[in-house]
Image (tube, rainbow, N blue to C red):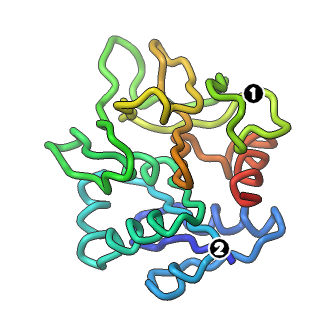
Amino acid sequence: MIAIIDYGMGNLHSVSKAVERLGYEAVITADPAVIAAADRAILPGVGAFGDAMQNLRETKLDEVAKAYAASGKPMLGICLGMQLLFSESEEYGTNEGLNLLPGKVVRFAGDYKIPHMGWNKLSFLQGQSPLFSGLTEGHVYFVHSFHVKPELSSDLLATTDYYQQVTAIVGRGNVYGMQFHPEKSGELGMQLLGNFLKM
């Protein structure tokens, strides 16, 4: 069973339907016991980093997410959910994240369109990652105004280019993140999500 963590700020149903299309049982839940018992956990997210962390703290789901990550079972953050895995964000002031991975979330800065929205090609940096098993680089769908700068290059699994190198996929041990929306990214997105669910 795949737990999709419901803290009030996510594209929950589209992620749930994508998981079910891949042949897995999905449950949208804020119940710590259900999350702890799940085979995999997904932390989705749409909106502002600070609001998301406040919701997580108020519901104690921040501790639930940290405990799940520490359990060794695979966990995936999607879009804002990926950003929440990191130490802090500068969105609307400095906000502390879950700190499962070291790094900072910063706003795009430059004379170009923000948010970054549309299809961009992934570049796999660490081909041995089980996420990329059987896959070739292709395009996925991004919508974001902030991007992650990981402290450790070893946590960076894939990038895309948007006037600079942009973090697209991160991972360490059992904790993974995708800045784009795999459930809205066609065949490659579904393949990446499927590889995560197979772990």
Residue 183, which numbered label?
Answer: none
Residue 199 vertical placement versus 91 (above, below): below
Q: Earlier in the sequence, mark 2 or mark 1?
A: 2
* Residue located beneath label 1 in the image: 138
Q: Quadrant of residue 38?
A: bottom right
* Type of amino acid under label 2: Asp
- Please provide percent x and percent y for residue 19: 72, 65
Q: Nearer the viewer, residue 31 or 187?
A: 31
Q: Secondary structure at mark 1?
A: loop
Relative to 142, 148 lies left or right: left
| Residue shown at the point (21%, 38%) measured from the top left | 90
Q: Quadrant of the C terminus?
A: bottom right
Relative to 49, 148 lies left or right: right
- Please provide percent x and percent y for residue 30: 45, 81
Relative to 47, 38 lies left or right: right
Crowd tier of the residue under label 2, counting other residues whose Cα lies within 10 Å: few below 14, some 14–19, many 20 or above:
some
- Please provide percent x and percent y for residue 29: 51, 81
Q: Nearer the viewer, residue 110 or 86?
A: 86
Residue 79 vertical placement versus 67 (above, below): above
Residue 97 vertical placement versus 171 (above, below): below
Q: Quadrant of residue 25?
A: bottom right
Q: Quadrant of the N terminus?
A: bottom right
* Type of amino acid under label 1: Gly
| Residue shown at the point (64%, 62%) measured from the top left | 14
* Residue located beneath label 2 in the image: 39
Q: Secondary structure at mark 2?
A: loop
| Residue shown at the point (79%, 46%) measured from the top left | 191
Closer to the eye: label 2 or 1:
2
Hey, which residue is sitting farthest left in the picture? 93
- Please provide percent x and percent y for residue 70: 44, 65
- Between the residue at mark 2 and the residue at mark 1, the CA separation in whole angstroms equals 28 Å
